[in-house]
Image: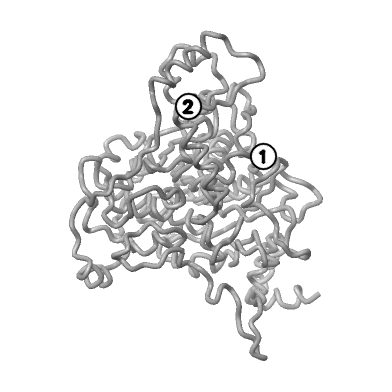
């Protein structure tokens, strides 16, 4: 995939192959639904019923009409907004944290959207966004596929220190199946890894945030795909068993979560093993201190799929741990039995979806949920289905967003966070007191109206990552030693440095020079 004009551009706007794939998907939405069929031949009755109902639905993707919700004086907009904070005030939710963590599946909190819940959704969404902002997408970099910052400075560098969490562990993933373009290796022969990608991190709330939210909250944030449909053809082939019952999950998602190889440097253990080891350690640590602990897992796109697999495993292996998933633009992950087992395990899932985004329709497109209303669903173990409660957003609700088809823009996580910040209810207009910086929407796409004068795809490293050396030549910079990916060595060095009372960088430099 071309990186366009920026390193970060994980949602390219001019990729013709991607647009061709989306056109095919748009066409499929008018035809018979695509389902992951088993090897055995389905009955004529099922096939006939499926075909008849799909013709009745006449499914299509809605193009937002060119109408404004309310008039805005764009000349005054800058003066009004630039002098206001970009975040809503933090409310103490300690007495209500169970409700915010879905003790009642967020009943009566979504429409209208409770302001406390809105802020929490945005907080977790920003944790997911960090996995994009810190990811090295530059195929000309020897560190392509890694995180550009070490875990101790990740939140500080990305402006997330105010959220009150500290990163405790990075997660790396690989796959044993053919992967799409977003997992391609660096173009250089010598690179940090030829097998693994940085896929996210584990973080935990600090003491102050813990008091505010009423419990010690462990967060796992999973990175998503580079573009809306790059994984579509490669990662929706088949369902395979998970757990000990009838539950099945999509083969490609499961491969990313569970693959490992002894000969690799970063995936001698799988992403599953890495994350569960750290989550288990943190749960035991804080429970021994007598604290109440929760686990919140978040992710966008593919990251939302990995979040569900992570939640399934965590709820299955750690007793009495409140587990919630807050996902954005996530695809379907498993079959009906997978959904039912998640419910039985007590996992609470909130799916934030944009009406115009096609990724939540995959795999299998939109028809699968309709089959659940039929008596024949008990025999359809191969039908994909969504899990949990849904917060549905609409691009048309925001006066700041352009109308017309914009697939990358519809799927962008920043678009999601903008719409969450402005959502009040399905019967209300975009809230005028929305705080989040509107300019963030255009970080990697072109969704904002021209009147705002915000360049599209503006998020990139200065000079696209090049620096001028002492001789006046523009070169790729060397990473700071502490930011060079080496998770196993980093863990040992951190302990070493603490015991010796030294700074991490003081220990790193002689070791890396060997």
Q: Is the C-beta separation of discs 1 and 2 under 8 Å? A: no
Quadrant containing the N terminus is bottom right
SS type, badge 2: loop
Q: CA distance from mark 1 to mark 2?
A: 30 Å
Numbered tag placed on residue 433 in the rendering: none
Left or right: 159 in relation to 114: right
* Point 38% across, 20% down: residue: 56
Residue 50 visible here: yes
List x then y, in percent, for residue 71. Answer: 18, 57
Residue that badge 2 annotates: 31
SS type, badge 1: helix
List x then y, in percent, for residue 482. Answer: 64, 72
List x then y, in percent, for residue 175. Answer: 69, 44
Quadrant containing the C terminus is bottom right
Residue that badge 1 annotates: 255
User: Which tag, 1 or 2, sits closer to the chain's start?
Assistant: 2
**Front tag of 1 and 2:** 2
Total numbered badges shown on the rendered structure: 2
Instruction: Name the outermost residue toward the bottom.
Output: 471
List x then y, in percent, for residue 506. Answer: 67, 78
């Amino acid at each position: 995939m071309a990186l366009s004009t920026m390193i970060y551009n994980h949602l390219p706007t001019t990729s013709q192959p991607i647009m061709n794939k989306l056109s095919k998907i748009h066409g499929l939405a008018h035809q018979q639904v695509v389902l992951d069929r088993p090897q055995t031949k389905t009955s004529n009755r099922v096939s006939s019923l499926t075909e008849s109902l799909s013709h009745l639905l006449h499914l299509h993707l809605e193009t937002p009409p060119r109408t404004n919700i309310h008039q805005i004086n764009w000349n005054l907009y800058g003066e009004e907004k630039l002098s206001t904070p970009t975040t809503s005030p933090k409310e103490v939710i300690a007495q209500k944290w169970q409700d915010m963590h879905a003790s009642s599946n967020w009943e009566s909190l979504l429409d209208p959207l409770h302001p406390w819940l809105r802020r929490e959704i945005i907080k977790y969404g920003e944790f997911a966004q960090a996995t994009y902002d810190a990811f090295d997408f530059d195929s000309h970099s020897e560190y392509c596929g890694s995180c550009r910052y070490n875990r101790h400075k990740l939140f500080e560098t990305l402006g997330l220190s105010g959220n009150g969490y500290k990163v405790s562990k990075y997660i790396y993933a690989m796959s044993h199946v053919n992967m799409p373009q977003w997992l391609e290796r660096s173009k250089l022969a010598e690179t940090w890894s030829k097998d693994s990608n940085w896929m996210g991190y584990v973080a935990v709330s600090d003491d102050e945030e813990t008091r505010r939210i009423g419990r010690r909250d462990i967060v796992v944030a999973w990175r998503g795909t580079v573009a809306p449909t790059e994984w579509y053809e490669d990662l929706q082939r088949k369902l395979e068993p998970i757990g000990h019952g009838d539950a099945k999950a999509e083969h490609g998602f499961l491969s990313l979560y569970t693959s490992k190889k002894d000969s690799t440097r970063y995936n001698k253990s799988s992403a599953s093993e890495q994350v569960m080891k750290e989550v288990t350690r943190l749960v035991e640590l804080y429970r021994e201190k007598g604290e109440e602990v929760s686990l919140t897992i978040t992710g966008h796109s593919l990251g939302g799929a990995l979040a569900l697999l992570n939640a399934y495993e965590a709820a299955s292996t750690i007793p009495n741990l409140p587990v919630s998933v807050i996902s954005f633009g996530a695809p379907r992950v498993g079959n009906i039995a997978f959904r039912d087992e998640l419910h039985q395990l007590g996992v609470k899932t909130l799916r934030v979806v944009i009406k115009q985004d096609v990724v939540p329709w995959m795999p299998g497109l939109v028809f699968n949920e309709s089959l659940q209303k039929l008596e024949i669903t008990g025999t359809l173990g191969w039908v994909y289905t969504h899990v949990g409660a849904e917060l549905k957003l609409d691009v048309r609700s925001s006066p700041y967003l352009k109308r017309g088809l914009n697939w990358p823009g519809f799927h962008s996580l920043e678009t999601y966070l903008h719409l969450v910040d402005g959502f009040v209810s399905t019967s209300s207009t975009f809230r005028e007191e929305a705080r989040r910086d509107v300019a963030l929407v255009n970080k990697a796409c072109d969704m904002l109206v021209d009147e705002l004068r915000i360049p599209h795809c503006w998020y990139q490293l200065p000079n696209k990552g090049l620096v001028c050396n002492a001789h006046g030549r523009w070169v790729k910079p060397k990473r700071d030693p502490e930011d060079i990916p080496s998770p196993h060595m980093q863990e040992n060095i951190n302990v070493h440095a603490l015991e010796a009372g030294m700074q991490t960088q003081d220990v790193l430099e002689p070791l890396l020079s060997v």
